[in-house]
Amino acid sequence: METGCWLLGGEFEDSVFEERRERRPGPPESYRAKRCEPQWFYEETGSSDDVEALTVQKFKGDLAYRRQEYQKALQEYSSISEKLPSTNFAMKRDVQEGQARCLVHLGRHKEALEIATNLENKATNTDHLTTVLYLQFTICSSLQNLEKTIFCLQKLISLHPFNPWNWGRLGEAYLNLGPVLSASLASSQKENSFTSSDTAIKSSFPHSGKDCLLCFPETLPEGSVEVSSGNKQRNEKALKNIQNRMTEERAAVLLETQMKACASFIRTRLLLQLAQCQQTSFALERNLKTQQEIEDKMKRFSFKEDTLLLIAEVMGEDIVPEKIRDEVHTEVKCVGPAALTALVIGSSKEFEDKWFRKIKDHFCPFENQFHTEIQILP
């Protein structure tokens, strides 16, 4: 045989050459699974093992949480945390997460955030970080802080870009953020407009000080009245321009968040469509239901077909079956906190530049056309 050639099937596992174990005579031993009665952990276990005793106590805390008895659950978790040995990292993380979630339900968000931050700093692999980010998302959602909620979702997506459910949550968050930002901008502009209005009124009257009260238009020289009238017209025109600009700014803010929401929903749908062929039963049912909900939301934007095609093209550039398969079966990356930090985006701007910049750049030269093309329905 020539060098470099090999026979098909010429490679064998070592196990092929191992001797088989001899079977013991007689019937095989029957397997008996350990059966536990419901809420068995409330009974006296009589265990001298400290770890087992703490595990039983954790079950009690978990059940109290499930029953929405958050104060009782918090007491159980806090008691466990004090007794846990410093080397039991796994249970320590579980207990601290339980404490944080109880604190959220009890309205003690600051304490919950402190625990979440501590867990994030001590995370050593991607699973730990993912769990912490979901915890932070829960806390920020409970606080109804939309901007921080969005940032949590953006960090989760940067860690798992092919998770459709986080993209869907991000789209919902952007939908809710638009009116909030628009209202906040309107309030700020209203204050500024009052200041501008006062300045304009004062500039209409050249006299100031105590003598101003005595200077009525009918007592002023004829030339002064004409100057005052001209100033008034100019100021009214300036105020009208300011108001128009404010209206345009509010519309632009609302439009941008609508665009981000639409892009997020489109990516959600693309990912769900790709996963659809591999799903059955309730998973497929949930998939199809979500796709229909997205379809209904898309109608609110009234985007033209070519606009939707462009957004779909941009948001689906990296969606390749091989990549998604690698994402699903990826190994947990065990690295230090510093390396984990590098895996997620550092700011909301960084995330939006990566995912939405191409869409914004495409419409930037045709901004006026884009504004008239898209009609946001109530």
Image (spheres, rainbow, N blue to C red):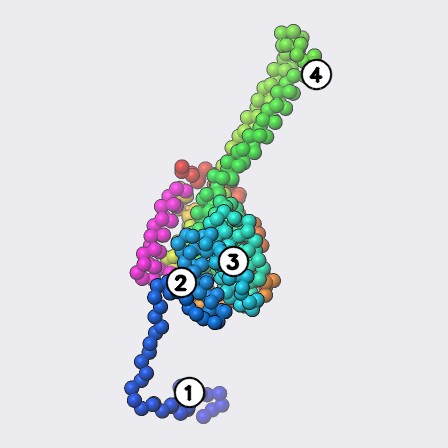
* Residue on which disc 1 sits: 15
Kind of residue at disc 1: Ser
User: In terms of secondary structure, where does tag 1 sit?
Assistant: helix
Image quadrant in which the C terminus is located = top left
Kind of residue at disc 4: Gly
Asked whether the residues under the numbered discs 4 and 2 touch, taking CB atoms below 8 Å apart as contact, a structural biologist would say: no
User: In terms of secondary structure, where does tag 2 sit?
Assistant: helix
User: In terms of secondary structure, where does tag 3 sit?
Assistant: helix
* Residue on which disc 2 sits: 42
Asked whether the residues under the numbered discs 3 and 4 touch, taking CB atoms below 8 Å apart as contact, a structural biologist would say: no
* Residue on which disc 3 sits: 78
299 is within the stretch colored magenta: yes
- Given residues 207 and 306, the one toward you in this image is 207
Q: Position of residue 233 (x, y in %)?
A: 58, 19
| Number of residues whose C-alpha sits closer than 10 Å to that of mark 2, classed few (under 14), some (14–19) or many (20 or more) | few
Kind of residue at disc 3: Ser
Q: What is the number of the mark on residue 331?
A: none
Q: Nearer the viewer, mark 2 or mark 1?
A: 2
**Mark pair 4, 2: CA separation:** 83 Å
**Mark pair 3, 2: CA separation:** 18 Å
User: Is residue 71 visible in the rendered structure shown here?
Assistant: yes
- Given residues 303 and 200, the one toward you in this image is 200
Which residue appears at 36% of the width and 48% of the height?
A: 293
Image quadrant in which the N terminus is located = bottom left
